Image (spheres, grey):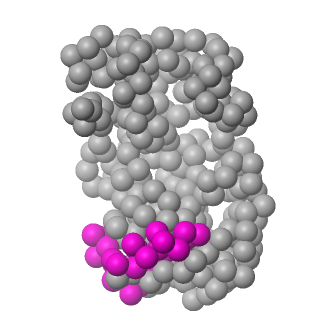
Amino acid sequence: MTIVVTGATGQLGHLVVESLLRRGASPADVLATGRDADRLRALADLGVRTAVVDYADPASLRDAFDGADRVLFVSGSEVGQRIPQHTNVVEALRSAGVGLVAYTSIAGADTSTMQLAAEHQATEQMLRDAGLPLVLLRNSWYLENYTPQVPTYLEHGAVVGAAGDGRVSAATRADYADAAAAVLLDPDAAPGTAYELGGEGFTLAELAAAVAEASGREVVYRDVTEDELAGILVGAGLPDPVARVFADSDRGIARGELEVTSGDLERLIGRAPTSMRQAVADAVAAQP
């Protein structure tokens, strides 16, 4: 069975390739694709086949998908460019007649009001309209959205957000990658399935408390308005449009749009996902 992983030079895609191999996939059956030739060389060292593929280059997509049994379609990283790029991917998948496509979407994509969800909603519809045998991997937030900020939390003694008491079911990239690999290798994976994936939910106040507990220092949650958060993020160096997308995502958390209670992630990976408290403790321990 030939498995193609798109976006394999990104953080999630690379982890999926590693998980496929750990789960017993033959390296010769895995084709890792991406735009960065240097990062592809690191994947080639694992024994898998590689190909330089760009979502903006339809010919490279057609070549990669030719003869593929299963494809992991990792959503593009360029917000605002996803629709034209994803259109190219979907057309190449349709032309290739791939046996199963797994697409990395966002939690609750069919009902979410978050700005980040709009391109995922459009892509899911394109995939359906193309008549492709489709599995949706609807990932909630990454714990890595928070753990790199631990030094900032400690410096200021606060986690700042606009999420109120909303709960977010974040999990690690490695856990989401393991779930994707499990689906790709499952001979009984059923087209039409939508997996809602996330870890144990927590509030940002609970995140602050976990940082305080792991560090022995005072860290509190400071709740601000969506506009105030956008201004803080702009002051930290983010472009205004990006800052507003992140602030809007906190609004989504406040509305419960990134809370997942399905248990799908744990069932797919066969273990409990890494907890927020463990991820925070590891991040604190890594500080000088």
Where residue 51 sits: x, y (%)? 54, 80
Asked if 75 appears above or below 283 in the picture, the reply is below
Quarter of the image where the C terminus is located: top left
Left or right of 77 in this view: 72: left
At horizontal 28% and vertical 76% (from top left) the residue drawn is 24
Q: Position of residue 43 (x, y in %)?
A: 40, 73
Residue drawn at the location 55% of the way across and 69% of the way down: 36
Residue drawn where x is 72% and y is 74% of the image:
57
Number of labels in the image equals 0
Residue 261 forms part of the magenta stretch: no
In the image, residue 255 sits, relative to residue 144, either above or below, namely above
Residue 131 shows in the view? no
For the question of whether residue 235 can be seen, the reply is: yes
Q: Is residue 117 above or below residue 227?
A: below
Q: Within the image, what quadrant is residue 263 found in?
A: top left
The image position of residue 111, as x and y in percent, is 66, 38
Q: Residue at x 67, y 80 (%)?
A: 60
The residue closer to the viewer here, 86 or 77, is 77
Asked if residue 29 lies in the magenta stretch, the reply is yes
Q: Which residues are magenta?
A: 21-46
Q: Looking at the image, which is closer to me, 147 or 185?
A: 147
Quarter of the image where the N terminus is located: bottom left
Left/right placement of residue 18 relative to residue 194 reads left
Q: Nearer the viewer, residue 208 or 260?
A: 208
Residue 254 at what x, y percent from top left? 56, 21
The image quadrant of residue 204 is: top left
